[in-house]
Image (spheres, rainbow, N blue to C red):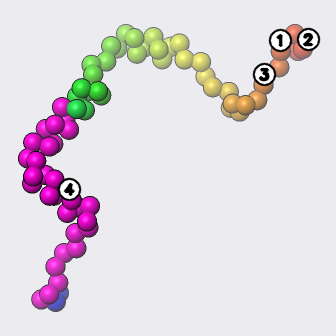
């Protein structure tokens, strides 16, 4: 390695490092925001009902099924 070599850091990496340095509680705020919208407890009963009520999708979504009357 040459003496003048230094590791490359992108502009985005520098920006994130500067933001974290200027706002030390930024990561805690992000975690609080995630918990507010996404980290919710699941109701296992409702989840099981939803999975049982699911109808399988047709292989070709835009195709039409023949009418039961025309099959006769």
Q: Nearer the viewer, residue 7 or 71?
A: 7
Q: Which residue is mark 3?
A: 65
Q: Tell me how far mark 4 sits from mark 3, CA to CA.
A: 53 Å
- Residue 47: x and y in percent read 40, 15
- Residue 45: x and y in percent read 37, 10
Q: Tell me how far mark 4 sits from mark 2, CA to CA.
A: 67 Å
On whether residue 28 falls in the magenta region, the answer is yes
Q: Which residue is mark 1?
A: 68
Q: Left of 20 or right of it: where is 63?
A: right
Assess whether mark 1 and mark 4 are in contact (beta carbons under 8 angstroms). no
**What segment carries the magenta color?**
3-32
Choose mark 2 or mark 3, whichever is in front: 3
Q: Which residue is mark 2?
A: 72
Assess whether mark 2 and mark 1 are in contact (beta carbons under 8 angstroms). yes
Q: Tell me how far mark 4 sits from mark 1, CA to CA.
A: 61 Å
Q: Say which element carries label 4.
A: helix
């Amino acid at each position: 390695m040459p003496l003048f070599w230094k590791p490359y850091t992108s502009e985005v990496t520098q920006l994130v490092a500067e933001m974290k340095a200027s706002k030390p509680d930024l990561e805690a705020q992000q975690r609080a925001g995630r918990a507010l919208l996404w980290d919710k407890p699941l109701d296992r009963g409702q989840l099981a009902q939803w999975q049982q009520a699911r109808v399988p999708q047709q292989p070709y979504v835009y195709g039409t099924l023949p009418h039961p009357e025309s099959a006769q």
